[in-house]
Image: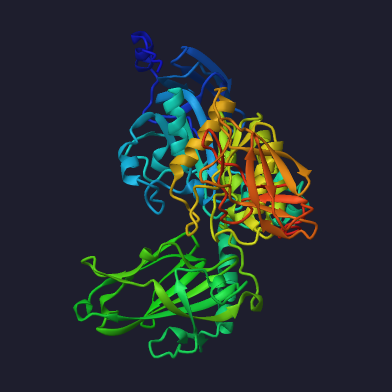
Amino acid sequence: MKKLILSLTFSLCFFLLPDIQLEAKIKLPAIFTDNMVLQQQTEAPIWGESSPRKKVKIITSWNRKQYITKADESGNWKILVKTPQYGGPYSIVISDGSILRLVNVMIGEVWLCSGQSNMEMPLAGWGKINNYEQEIAAADYPNIRLLQVEKKTSTLPLKDVEVAMGGWVECSPKTIPSFSATAYFFGRELYKNKQIPIGLIHTSWGGTLAEAWTSGSSLKTMPDFVPAIKSIEAEALTPEQAKALYDKQLADWNNEVIAKDKGFVNGQPAWSKVSFDDNDWKSIKAPGYLEKQGFPNFDGIVWLRKSIEIPESWASKRLTLSLGTIDDNDVTYFNGEEIGRTNGWDQFRNYPIPAILVEKGKAVITVRVHDTGGEGGFYGEASAMKLTDSSGNSISLSGEWKCNASLNATEISPAPRSFSDPNRCSVLFNAMLNPLIPYGIRGAIWYQGEANADRAYQYRELLPLMIKDWRQHWGKEFPFYIVQLANFKNMDGDVSASQWAELREAQLQTALHLKNTGLAVTIDIGDTKDIHPKNKQEVGRRLSLIARANAYGENISYSGPEFDSYQIEGNAIRLRFKHTEGGLVSKEKSLKGFYIAGLDHKFLSAEAKIDGDDILVSHGDIINPVAVRYAWADDPTGNLYNGAGLPASPFRTDDWPGITWNRK
């Protein structure tokens, strides 16, 4: 690591200036703080506010150069400072007559890290990635700097963001637990291999759509989003007015739902009462999705009940009810009394039960679940579902529950959209991205797609549009690396019907056809039961391989086998691949995950054999094959790798319309 020792003269000059004041008039955006990292070998923008027409000076300690500009009539100013090759720590002095100094500034590589919950997933907290305690204890990297952007929405582009921990911080066991695990492991791998200061700007929000991260000007070019953008632009309400309007709309909607919900009688939750007879309800297993247990294609409201025995030693004691994660929203009752409610499929449910409600003998837990779309109900680990006393003794709540539907989503009007809803078009770009522009960055990493899976064909246009949108706003075609969705949900399944497979294809096509992009394939490190897989170390490593090879020019393997072309040879299909460094390999005796179809378009599990850098695929009952699919399912069993140990992306040779075709 290069170090620069400032001369005594330069260090003292700031203390000898006669007009230093206690409070600086200069106002900087939240992204400029002590400990920050500036992108090396560039003209890094620094901007802020001062008095109108005020002269602003910047002096940088690495070259002792002075930059001068004048604020405009609104007090805004911007200066480009020339940065050297990596090094530090340095200082920056900004003055408009009063002095503001930034210290412990590093010059290095800055990466923007964004997406939804798998990017947001922290090392600890709700994330608890693999070996999180050891990873946190070992996270002593003062030359990796972290900036955490706080969640916020806006219908208009904002000038500044809100940040956690007061701004940039050094990576340490104290600062890393709540930071993005994917971003951290990506940055750590870069630092270990390049020995260059790394700046990570994390701006993400779980469960959010890609269109929320795209500017309105770009979304207007896609007809699907024009009405939504026009609606947002037409809003002329203050935040206070918008909130009051939404609160009224939500109250009216809730009243409509309760009036139509069979679980309520005269406005009271009758199905939560201990005396209610649920003998004719269906029995389901928890955790487990409702759609797989007698409620196919259901969206709406269901009630779930479970009877337990409270031991005498627990009577009149405060308990904790843990339900793990629920898709999507819940209201939970204990012996007919509401004890908690939570919105969000990715939120853990932990509800205190007051001692006054706890009596010896039978108790009934009732959970009213609102499934707003896709799969719904309890999911995650069975061990997370339990009732616990203050001493740590617990009763498991997994296993059999009674369940009954009370209201289908088709029977009610759509819920109103909140002014703070993060899934409105452009509101996250406006509030959590626009204020960062044009801060100097090397590139971006992106982990998102789950929320757009039901519109995967649309994502083929939307993701490239978003990337080009960001690049246009920054004024540079920076590297953009995508994490492909991991395996999740059901083992294999119908290879002709998978939203997640179609979303992965959209991500793959973007990486193949849009310049300076890359794809980190994670199809082998997901979790069937958890949409948030814990092995974020490998996700970060695979992203770093792409960056090291493409952004930094290292001669290393960075991609698994990439399908290139196919040729029909009699009753078999030959597949050709790129990125076969070390040869094609299977981690088991035979290749799995290959399916082949004939003229009837029906796919059958195929025999696949490695032939050099090719694979021959066939099935004894298919004489005239026309198409092959590999790992084409929500949670496939594919096992194709190259000699570098990197997995092949799911792919298909056909272009037959999928199940998300024409979904808007």
Query: Residue 208's spot in the image, x, y percent?
Result: 57, 53
Farthest residue to the front: give it.
620
Quadrant for the N terminus, please: top left
Query: Residue 211's spot in the image, x, y percent?
Result: 65, 50
Q: Is residue 647 shown above or below 594?
A: above
Q: Residue at x 50, y 16 (%)?
A: 85
- Asked whether, in this view, residue 166 is left or right of residue 210, the answer is left
Farthest residue to the left: give it.
313
Q: Nearer the viewer, residue 114 or 149?
A: 114
Type of colouring: rainbow
Query: Residue 619's spot in the image, x, y percent?
Result: 69, 54
Q: Is residue 318 among what the camera can see?
A: yes
Q: Residue at x 44, y 29 (%)?
A: 36
Q: Nearer the viewer, residue 293 or 44?
A: 293
Quadrant for the C terminus, please: bottom right
Q: Residue at x 54, y 55 (%)?
A: 207
Q: Is residue 647 shown above or below 38?
A: below
Q: Nearer the viewer, residue 284 or 13?
A: 284
- Asked whether, in this view, residue 236 is left or right of residue 71, the answer is right
Query: Residue 176's spot in the image, x, y percent?
Result: 37, 40
Q: Is residue 141 shown above or below 87?
A: below
Q: Nearer the viewer, residue 246 or 379?
A: 379
Q: Quadrant of residue 100?
A: top left
